[in-house]
Image: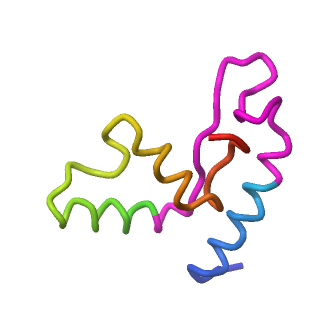
Amino acid sequence: MILDNLQATQLIIRQNKVTQESRANDLAQTADKTMRWGISMPPRLYFMLEKYVKAHGDKGLFREQGDITWFMKKFPQFKIPKKV
């Protein structure tokens, strides 16, 4: 099945909710606390955001400390942790 961009994004958002519920705690850590999940988005969306950010003079998407936290707060549908 081939999905358009909207369908792929909606599928990722639903998948993110399932993943969020499967994490060991509100910070989205694994059960052994060796890994913490951050965000999940369609690859094409990431590519387009990266291209946009670079075209406007920035080094790239998620290059500086705090960028992912900012993104999770602004676009919660793509975050995995319940708490940021």
Provide the major secondary structure of the magenta segment.
Answer: loop
Q: Nearer the viewer, residue 47 or 80?
A: 80
Quadrant position of residue 10: bottom right
Q: Is residue 27 magenta?
A: yes
Q: Is residue 18 left or right of residue 45?
A: right
Residue plotted at (72% across, 28% down):
29
Seen as rendered, the residue at the extreme left is 57
Magenta residues, start to end: 18-45
Q: Is residue 1 magenta?
A: no
Q: Nearer the viewer, residue 76 or 63?
A: 76
Compared with 19, 56 (above or below) is below
Compared with 45, 79 (above or below) is above
Colour scheme of the picture: rainbow
Residue plotted at (80% across, 36% down):
23
Q: Is residue 14 left or right of residue 74?
A: right
Q: Nearer the viewer, residue 39 or 26?
A: 26
Residue plotted at (27% across, 51% down):
60
Q: Position of residue 4 (x, y in %)?
A: 59, 83
Q: Position of residue 41 (x, y in %)?
A: 57, 59
Compared with 27, 74 (above or below) is below
Q: Position of residue 46 (x, y in %)?
A: 44, 60
Q: Nearer the viewer, residue 84 or 12?
A: 84
Q: Position of residue 36 (x, y in %)?
A: 64, 30
Quadrant position of residue 84: top right
Q: Is residue 49 left or right of residue 14?
A: left
Quadrant for the N terminus in the image: bottom right
